Image (cartoon, grey):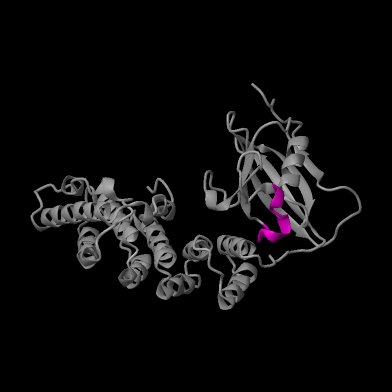
Amino acid sequence: MIDIDPLEGWLSTPLGELSPQRIRELQTEAHEGLETLAAYLDNPPRRPDLRDGMRGLFWLRYSPAGFASADVPRAQAVYRRIFEMGGAGSMDAQRAVLTLLGGSADPQTVPFWLEMVDLTKPRDKFRQERVTLSLAALALIAIRRDEAAAYDALHQLTRHANPAIRAQAVLYLRHAYADAGRPVPEAVLTDMFLVATQDKAFEPRFQARRLLRVSGQPVPLDNPGGVYDFKVMMLRNKRIYRTITARSEQTLADLQRFIQHAFAWDNDHLYCFYMNGRKYDDHYQFACAYEEDRPPWASEAVIGELGLVKKHRFLYHFDYGDDHLFEVEVVDIRPDVREGNYPRLIDSHGKAPAQYY
């Protein structure tokens, strides 16, 4: 399991803060750990556990120096052997080697990362993490080396057949330009507008719209002048719900305030929305401005700009102490708007529980 975003981990200690001697020391430690692991693979015990052969390699995984360039081909070969061998400790060994390879930010690894995105086998529990590490590694190469091949690889992967990979590719493509302070090329912006408006999956649409916003480009407004109907259900008891309609031009902050009103609760705690329905996924989060010192904030999340479609579900989290969770479903999107104030309540079912126990 990834404990932090790999790109964030690699960028947390800039290489410029390390002396050349310290970089050599870290790369020497990585080299020794790699050779120890390779020797273990050459002569495994009867019941191998790859964690026994790592000898500190795991704790080096977010070393800002990664592997020395001369060790990169060797590390790639060792990784392939770990993948084929599998068994006990395989996930930890894969994580350690790939994370150090990613931290190397070596342009010669671009083809390797493209290979890793589609590498899999039956019962491959590490696949999603391998994809994330691969895309983040391409972004790091782009940021640190200004490597055209890495930018091109990420751009290429925004067209992948797997929507989850497309979404992550867009996310890391955004980081590759924004974190490096480089403008997004016009051709990429054109493609991102197409993803934002035409991709059938929510996550790529959402990430493409975020890239456009960060790049200072207009974000498509769906259903202008219309309304969205949201069924807001308590996760603890989905028979208790409120259906609320809001204008396309209103924000998630507007919706949040009315949710509190509809359940007759005070609006006196922090909150956030997770637009992919996964709690604590920062890549899809809109928080209140009191919680985060930088956007994206719920007050800036225009409902019609989120790429929502009917039946899409997301998560509303209110009061992190009492941990109130609501599932929000888009039950209808209508072009017609009646006169009056919005958001408004259009259906109510079940008595809301007391806010405080």
Which residue corresponds to the image point at 69% horizontal and 53% vertical from the top-left? 301
Q: Residue 250: within the magenta?
A: no
Residue at the limit of the structure toward the right, as seen here: 339
Q: Quadrant of residue 102?
A: bottom left
The picture places residue 112, in percent across and down from the top left corner, at 31, 69
The percent coordinates of residue 321 (x first, y second) are 58, 29
Please give the name of the residue rendered at 56% of the width and 60% of the height, measured from the top-left corner: 203
Establish if 134 lies above or below 339.
below
- Of residue 175 and residue 330, the one placed in the foreground of this image is 175
| Quadrant occupied by the C terminus | top right
> Is there any visible trace of residue 316 in the rendered image?
no
Of the pair 250 and 34, the residue shown nearer to us: 34
Magenta span of residues:
299-310
91 relative position to 315: left or right: left
Which residue is rendered at x = 37% and y = 70% of the image? 114
Q: Position of residue 131 (x, y in %)?
A: 39, 61
Q: Is residue 343 left or right of residue 136?
A: right
Quarter of the view holding residue 111: bottom left
Residue 257 shows in the view: yes
- The one of 344 and 157 positioned closer to us in this rendering: 157
